[in-house]
Amino acid sequence: MNISDLKKGRRGTIAKAISIIENDPTEAKKLIKKIYKETGNASIIGITGPAGAGKSSLINKTTVELKKLNTKPAVLAIDPTSHVTGGAILGDRVRMTESTDSGTYIRSVASRGAVGAISRSLRNSIRILEYAGFNPIIIESVGAGQTEVEISNIADITVVVFNPNTGDSIQTIKAGLTEIGDIYLINKSDLDGANQLYDAVREYIGVSAKNPVILKTSVKKNSGISEFAKHLKEMMLKKKENKKEKDMARLEIELKDIILNNIREKMNTMLDSDKLFSKYLKKIQSKEMDPFEAADKVARSLTK
Ligand SMILES: Nc1nc2c(ncn2[C@@H]2O[C@H](COP(=O)(O)OP(=O)(O)OP(=O)(O)O)[C@@H](O)[C@H]2O)c(=O)[nH]1
Ligand SMILES: [Mg+2]
């Protein structure tokens, strides 16, 4: 891996680096060691919302506008194709191609595996893009279950996208997406029901402490998008101070996460050859002892 090619933002090198982050833990550690000092300076924009809300379409157009505002955006899309519910809805999902020509780096990243592992590799893929000079870095993720909450932990600016097509939008709004957004978009404003949805979102969300921006957009009619980009740019500047504090807290969480993960892996290996472990396993298999008591005994001896 040629670090200076990465610094120059060479596409092939970036792609290779992110693959290393996702697939090769040993090499990934070496890579992060080399670049870490020069990371942490980009604004992270999380874009979330129900499947098919128009997130990818919006990002396509928005990156073009963001470039006009003298920024150099990159996009990581947490690919939802492996989600259980994904396939059916995603028949007409938009591939982000439009802005590729204009120099935006776009990549789908893994969504399979444990939640912790995904956010670990996401964090480090962001670092690769920061080192390569991109800012902001936009993360697309489908709001399904816990993901949207997690995205708002990683992102400096969280954008929630709704559209009048999905009848359950109001339910989703009530179900908790009210807390996380800095910006709410009612996309597909060219469709019936957009105004009604806009009013509902204002009613449920407009009064919250965060005082979020609420906008109507239409990718189809190309309306509202440059306004959206301007708000993003403004927030990128405004949030800079606040970001430092957030980053310190995030690094604390990251350090704990890595340590706990290391310990877990080590313990796992130790247990495989631990005599007490096999002894107590037999005891619970033969119903001589219950699993809790057995686990207590083994854990106590391991952490002594
Ligand atoms: N009428 C209308 N259709 C739109 C608009 N924006 C997106 N679409 C369409 O909505 C469908 C889904 O768009 P995507 O951009 O793939 O939505 P997404 O939220 O990225 O979807 P997933 O990544 O699969 O969750 C596509 O057929 C788009 O062409 C809009 O403003 N108006
Ligand atoms: Mg998409």
Image: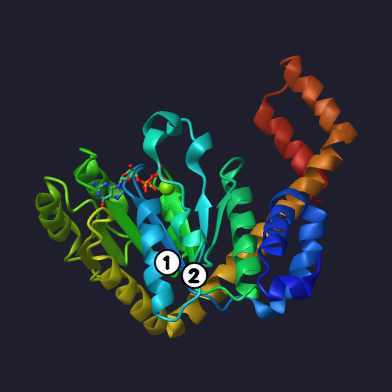
Q: Is residue 186 visible?
A: yes
SS for tag 1? helix
Colour style of the rendered protein structure: rainbow
Please indicate whether residue 55 sits to the left or right of residue 134 in the image: left
The residue that label 1 is drawn on is 63
Work out whether residue 298 or residue 70 is closer to the camera in this orientation and state it.
Answer: 70
Mark 2 vs ligand 2: CB under 8 Å? Answer: no
Q: Amino acid at mark 1?
A: Thr
Percent position of residue 162, x then y = 26, 51
Percent position of residue 238, x then y = 37, 83
Quarter residue 258 falls in = bottom right
User: Do labels 1 and 2 touch, CB within 8 Å?
Assistant: yes
Q: Amino acid at mark 2?
A: Pro
Percent position of residue 292, x then y = 66, 32
At 45% from the left edge and 83% from the top edge, which residue is drawn? Answer: 240
Badge 2 local density, few (<14 within 10 Å), some, or many (20+)?
Answer: many
Please indicate whether residue 63 sits to the left or right of residue 213 in the image: right
The residue that label 2 is drawn on is 73
Look at the picture and state if 278 lies above or below 252: above
At 63% from the left edge and 56% from the top edge, which residue is drawn? Answer: 120
* N-terminal label among 1 and 2: 1
Work out whether residue 37 or residue 222 is closer to the camera in this orientation and state it.
Answer: 222
